[in-house]
Amino acid sequence: MSELSVNHLLGIKYLNSQDIQLIFETADHFKEVINRPIKKVPSLRDITIANLFFENSTRTKLSFELAEKRLSADVINFSASQSSVKKGETLIDTVNNILSMKVDMVVMRHPNPGASVFLSQHVNASIINAGDGAHEHPTQALLDSYSIRERLGQVQGKNVVIVGDILHSRVALSNIFALQLQGANVMVCGPKTLLPKYIDKLGVKVETNLKKALQWCDVANMLRVQNERMDMTYFPSTREYTQQYGVNSALLNSLDKEITIMHPGPINRGVEITSDVADSKQAIILDQVQNGVAIRMAVIYLLASKIKH
Amino acid sequence: MNVLIKSATIVDSKSDFHNDTCDILIEKGVITQIQKTITAPSKTKEISLENLHVSQGWFDNSVSFGEPGYEERETIANGLRTAALSGFTDVAVNSNTNPVIDSYADISFLKGKSQDNAVNLFPIGALTKHSEGEDLAELYDMKNAGAIAFYDYQKPIRNPNLMKLALQYASNFDALVYSFPQESQISGLGVMNENVMSTSLGLKGNPSLAEELQIVRDLFLLEYTGGKLHIPTISTAKSVELIRDAKARKLDVSCSVAIHNLILTDDELKTFNTRFKVLPPLRTKSDCNALIEGLKDGTIDMVTSDHNPLDIEHKKIEFDYAKNGTIGLESAFGALNSIFTIKKTIELLTKGKERYGLNSTPIAVGQKAKLTLFNPSETYTLTKDLLHSSSKNSIFEEHQLKGKVYGIYSNHQLVIK
């Protein structure tokens, strides 16, 4: 198989395991490219990509832009801190205005779950979801799995725990779908107030005790508490949260094995992860960032090749 | 106009002619003959339609139109025409207009606008001023103008003391008070049923708990105050249990269910289609089954289409921003008839009037003619071009329905497609 089963990347739940395999193999190639002295290939000289960010982003936006430029695509950026509706223009109108300037692909981050799915149903362009509310962040999950594969050889059969604010996290959801698709065992761990009530029905283990979770896992993916998405207080204080769900070297040393620590960033040092852990050899946080560019190049390249057909 | 309905199968379990195929002669609005064969007198319009069935005129206890204020969604004139072509001779119309229907003058406006129509419009007044949930509206005055019940459409009364006062005050003049079953702190910003589907879509969930908690509160209040309480559009299995238990304890409570909540589940939302965004939200298959059971054993008193026209600008947007609601008059019969027998379907569509003190008109010689004409066996897929409503937000679009409505005879008028 040499092409994706989908025309958009809206979420991991819309992919199959061959798609993930293809993306990883393509990313292997691009990872080699970005480590060359000349980090650029001319593959997408005829493609124009719009990065539409309706929500703040630093690393995802930079990563996408870098991926696009290293594939030689033309890139335009559009940022709106407020939703299009509040500005009076509908999302479809905003995007169609941009598309009428002959744009082939849209990378969109949006605060509303399903916004990219909605857009894909109503506009004529290939859509990549760069995060839609608490729904999905597929490229993050792909680069996370890719990083596990790189560190541990494979994803299949590995025990992965996602720790923290699962309720407000698109990263958690995309990771659950991606890891399950590749045959990993998934656990979520956090205070009950930050775990969706029906999360176990997605086929994941649920644990509220961090030490037990870490003892079970091969990999721990530490999430940030998403204060900006909370409409009320879900735990009394950061201090209490850290006491229960912060990972530190004493906790890691008390385990009978060495586990891999991941974090999608941005890190709140001293909250969910201490500095010595974040900077340790067990952590692959910066590998994740580097792999992010290769994964995004792979996704863009594979979707663009479908446009050409 | 005098009308002779030819060869119609009568579906009316209270009529002597139930299941008989007869001709029905209507003169000056009154049924004057029901016979195997009647020869049409002069100046009589003859109606002969394929597989024609007739029943008593249907009643919908929760219909929203846009007038005044949201005429782009639906006008009263076209709304009533839609009701007629969908088989409804009587509709109770909600107060969710702009301004909200909360005064004698507002009720009089609705009555005036619907005067001389084939369909009877029964206004439901707001329970609180502007439906803001702060102070009681002029309930007595509105009742005198023709309001049949009092309801802040789909807005929970958050203050339990206000609900207590409403039940006490309305009982002075035997008025029916509605309480929308949703505890708003628990429902929070939920936009769909809380379950595995909401989890998988990352959409905020509105848990069953929110509905059930409010029902428990209101049943406790009713037990304390006395009075008459109606709980509109319940949607969960436990809600059915709670009301079943309250009825066993002889509380004067009634409830309804929206037809789409009997048939569709939250699985429909998997593509974020805003057509399926309704309040109460679509729940699970086991909730649907419990609601159907509740209808069969009489726990749930009546069904409603909960017809709520919304223009495309409020639906073709991101899911979180889209408004709740679906039109339902056009699909009500075809949807119900696809899950119940024809006898049960007609029983459900003609039920509920007595709760509002409205009379039924049986199919018998000497009775006022108020009939619905339909073909129960034709199956079809509902498409936008079949809709009469100004707004096309139908939850049953692309759904297979069973049974087509021809129209009604009511108030001396024949309205058929």
Image: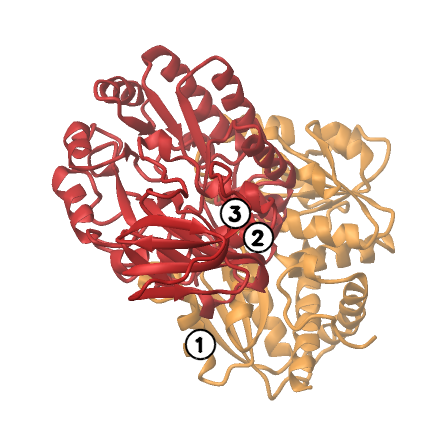
Chain colours: A orange, B red
Tag shown at residue B260: 3
- Where residue B72 sits: x, y (%)? 28, 62
Tag 2 secondary structure: helix
Q: x%, y% of residue A196?
A: 61, 37
**Residue B269, labelled with which disc?**
2
Depth check: give the residue in front, B306 or B325. Answer: B306
Q: Which tag, 2 or 3, sits closer to the chain's start?
A: 3
Answer left or right for A31 relative to B120: right
Q: Which amino acid does label 1 sit on?
A: Asn
Closer mark to the observer between disc 1 and disc 2: 2
Position above or below: B224 against A77: above
Badge 2: how crowded within 10 Å, few (<14), some, or many (20+)?
some
Disc 1 marks which residue?
A96
Q: Do the residues labelled 1 and 3 touch (CB within 8 Å)?
A: no
Q: Distance between the residues labelled 2 and 3?
A: 13 Å
Q: Residue at x 80, y 61 (%)?
A: A17
Answer with the quarter of the image where residue A121 lies.
bottom right
Secondary structure at numbered mark 1 = helix
The chain letter under disc 2 is B
Looking at the image, residue B319 sits to the left or right of residue B119; the answer is right
- SS class, disc 3: helix
For the question of whether residue B117 can be seen, the reply is yes
**Placement of the C terminus of chain A among the 4 image quadrants:** bottom right
Number of the front mark, 1 or 3: 3
Is there one chain holding both mark 1 and mark 3? no
Residue A81 in view: no
Read off the chain for label 1: A
Q: Residue at x 26, y 22 (%)?
A: B174
Q: What residue type is labelled 2?
A: Leu
